[in-house]
Amino acid sequence: MVDFTGVQILDSYALLDDKVWEEFKKFIGEDGDCLVKELIDQYLIEAPRLIDYMDNDLRVRDIMSLTKHVHTLKGRSGQLGAERIANLCRSIEDAILEGQYTEISPLFENLKEAYRRSETVIRQKASI
């Protein structure tokens, strides 16, 4: 069972994991800056859309769609090193799996705030 009372603990995760960024850049090579910018731009379009979908999923209580959207955002965030977002998504997935539905809304509120804060840092990375 996951302890959802410790949502504040998730705040200790970095907004972005610089190690992931460095590994990613190494992996794609010298000409990768253009690809990195493209992936970041795509993420900055897709992430808010997924968050909007999740908001709707919660309103209409569509757990199947919520699970799909949370899982997608978790993976995309993890790829870019957006650790706080990825971990909050993981916590939402855990809450769904454990039937702790009352814990989803507070986690989702934290997720929206984490994205808002991370977006600025991600945009700065895109301009490097």
Image (cartoon, rainbow, N blue to C red):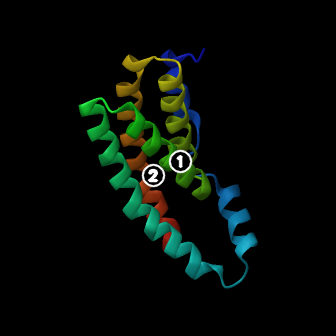
Q: N-terminal of the two: label 1 or label 2? A: 1
- Residue 118's disc is 2
Provide the secondary structure element on which disc 1 rests: loop
Circles 1 and 2: CB distance less than 8 Å? yes
Residue 128 seen in the figure: no
Front residue of this view, candidates 93 and 116: 93
Front residue of this view, candidates 118 and 37: 37
Tell me where residue 80 sits by quadrant. bottom right
Q: Amino acid at mark 1?
A: Leu
Residue 82 pos. (x, y %): 55, 51
Q: Residue at x 66, y 85 (%)?
A: 31
Q: Amino acid at mark 2?
A: Ser
Taking the image as shown, residue 26 lies to the left or right of residue 64, namely right
Front residue of this view, candidates 64 and 27: 64
Q: Which residue is mark 1?
A: 15
Q: CA distance from mark 1 to mark 2?
A: 6 Å
Relative height, residue 49 to residue 86 (above, below):
below
**For the view shown, which residue lies furthest in the bottom direction?**
31
- Residue 34's disc is none
